[in-house]
C-alpha cells in the first residue's frame, strides 16, 4: 500500500482527462411548442397547393463551466396563396457537456454539431404535428449547419469590417 503512494500513480482509472477535450449529450427536451391554424376549418375547404417557409435559429446559453443549453428554434409557415394554412413553432433543446476546447472550436461545436443532433427530433415532431392537424406529412429537408455557421461568421466579419472605418472617423 505504501508502495502505491510513493509511485505517484494517478487516482481513479489512471487516465488524466484534465487536458483532453470532452463532448457529451446530457439531455434532449422540448422547450416550447405551438401549432396554429389561423383560418380554422376554412383551411380545409380550399384546393391544397401549399407553400412552405422555414425559419431557423439557434441560441446557446452557458449553464455552468462545462454545460451548455442549446436551443434549436424552427418556425414552419405553410401558406395557401396569401393566407397561412398552419404555423408550427418548435424549440427543441439539449444540454451538452463540452470542455477542453478553445473558444473558436467551442463556438463551432455548439452552433453546428449540437443543432445537428437536435434537428431530427424537431423534424419528427413537426411531421407528426402536421399529420395530427389533418394535413399531409411534412418532412423537412436536411440542414447543413456547418454552412449556416460559416455564413453567419462571414456576415459578422463583413459587418465588423464595414464598421471599422466608421469608428475611426468618429
Image (cartoon, rainbow, N blue to C red):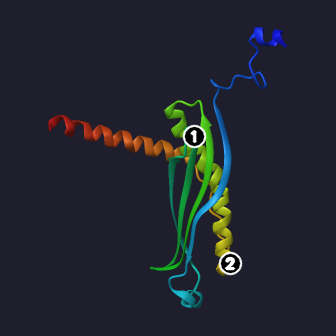
Q: Is residue 54 above or below residue 161?
A: below
Residue at the far left in the pictured view: 170
Residue 132 percent location from the top left of the image: 68, 78
Residue 37 percent location from the top left of the image: 54, 81
User: Going by the image, does 164 lie left or right of 150?
Assistant: left
Q: Which residue is mark 1?
A: 109
* Residue depicted at 66% across the width and 66% down the height: 125
Question: Where's the C terminus, which quadrant?
Answer: top left
User: Going by the image, does 159 lie left or right of 98?
Assistant: left
- SS for dot 2: helix
Q: Quadrant of residue 113?
A: top right
Marks 2 and 1: in contact by CB < 8 Å?
no
Q: Is residue 168 above or below residue 8?
A: below
Question: Where's the N terminus, which quadrant?
Answer: top right
Q: Is residue 96 above or below residue 19?
A: below
State the CA–CA distance, disc 1 to disc 2.
Answer: 34 Å
Q: Which residue is mark 2?
A: 132
Q: Quadrant of residue 162?
A: top left
Q: Nearer the viewer, residue 10 or 37?
A: 10
- SS for dot 1: helix
Q: Quadrant of residue 24?
A: top right
* Residue depicted at 64% across the width and 62% down the height: 123
User: Going by the image, does 68 lie left or right of 137?
Assistant: left
Amino acid at each position: 500500500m505504501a508502495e502505491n503512494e510513493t509511485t505517484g500513480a494517478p487516482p481513479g482509472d489512471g487516465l488524466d482527462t484534465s487536458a483532453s477535450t470532452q463532448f457529451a449529450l446530457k439531455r434532449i427536451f422540448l422547450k416550447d411548442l405551438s401549432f396554429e391554424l389561423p383560418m380554422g376549418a376554412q383551411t380545409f375547404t380550399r384546393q391544397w397547393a401549399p407553400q412552405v417557409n422555414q425559419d431557423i435559429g439557434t441560441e446557446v446559453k452557458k449553464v455552468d463551466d462545462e454545460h451548455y443549453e442549446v436551443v434549436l428554434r424552427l418556425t414552419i409557415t405553410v401558406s395557401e396563396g396569401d393566407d397561412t394554412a398552419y404555423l408550427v413553432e418548435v424549440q427543441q433543446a439539449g444540454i451538452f457537456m463540452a470542455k477542453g476546447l478553445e473558444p473558436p472550436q467551442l463556438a463551432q461545436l455548439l452552433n453546428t454539431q449540437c443543432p445537428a443532433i437536435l434537428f431530427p427530433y424537431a423534424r419528427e415532431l413537426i411531421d407528426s404535428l402536421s399529420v395530427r392537424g389533418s394535413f399531409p406529412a411534412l418532412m423537412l429537408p436536411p440542414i447543413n449547419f456547418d454552412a449556416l455557421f460559416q455564413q453567419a461568421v462571414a456576415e459578422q466579419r463583413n459587418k465588423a469590417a464595414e464598421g471599422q472605418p466608421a469608428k475611426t472617423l468618429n
